[in-house]
Image: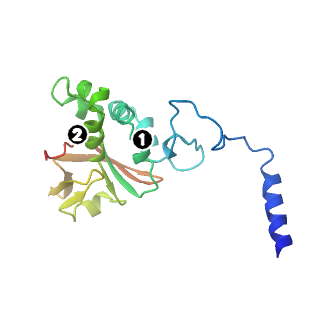
Amino acid sequence: MVFALVAFIYSCKNSNKDAPQTSTANEAEAPNSKTGQAFIQDDEGMPNCLQIAIGSPDHKTLVAAVQAAQVENALVNVGPLTVFAPTDAAFAALPEGTVENLVKPENKATLANILKYHVTPGNLSPAILTKLKKLGQANNQYVQVEVVDGKAVIGGANIIASVRAGNGIVHVIDKVLLPPSE
């Protein structure tokens, strides 16, 4: 039994000879290096929710906001996740100066709260959403779900497209969801 364990460990060591070297916990990291699942490169798997947003020409403002709030890892969580992704046009419909103000470093916590209000646990298809009244969001608040003409409307936002992700589903919406004031 011990011989089999030693042989297994030895073969695992040798099978990784040509694998790229990665840093260990003892090596110093760059002071502002980004860590976590959001920064792992994977060219083979199905894109996660963050990668879908990054690859979309209609979600540049959302991606910039996610980066400013440093909540990238929330969108690549193992999930499953349902992400409501406002388009650039949805952000542009906010009062003038709102986005510019929110991405300032001093407003990072407020921006993170708004962005987490766009994420809910579970892989919720449009059909499932029509059967719900409210959703518990990642910021520990609830968003109302209505059914209008047989389609789910999330906090007043219409779902204009849905994209499956490796860790859930992304629903493209036409409005930025703003959490209720506490």
How far across and how far down the image is residue 16, in percent?
77, 50
The figure's colour scheme reads rainbow
Residue picked out by circle 1: 72
How far across and how far down the image is residue 80, in percent?
41, 58
Q: Secondary structure at mark 2?
A: loop
Question: Along the horizontal axis of the image, is 4 left or right of 128?
Answer: right
Q: Residues within 10 Å of mark 2 (few under 14, many from 20)?
A: many
Residue picked out by circle 2: 176
Question: Along the horizontal axis of the image, is 59 left or right of 177?
Answer: right
Question: Along the horizontal axis of the image, is 13 left or right of 90?
Answer: right
| Amino acid type of the residue that numbered disc 2 sits on in the rendered structure | Val
Quarter holding residue 103: top left
Query: Could you say which is closer to the camera, residue 70 or residue 155?
Result: 70
Quarter holding residue 136: bottom left
Instruction: Give the distance between the C-alpha atoms of the residues marked 1 and 2, in whole angstroms.
Output: 18 Å
How far across and how far down the image is residue 38, in percent?
49, 43
| Amino acid type of the residue that numbered disc 1 sits on in the rendered structure | Glu
Query: Could you say which is closer to the camera, residue 73 or residue 156?
Result: 73
Task: Report if the CB atoms under discs 1 and 2 are less than 8 Å apart.
Answer: no
Query: Could you say which is closer to the camera, residue 82 or residue 109?
Result: 109
Q: Is residue 67 above or below residue 162?
A: above
Give the mark nearer the N terminus: 1 vs 2.
Answer: 1
Residue farthest to the bottom? 1
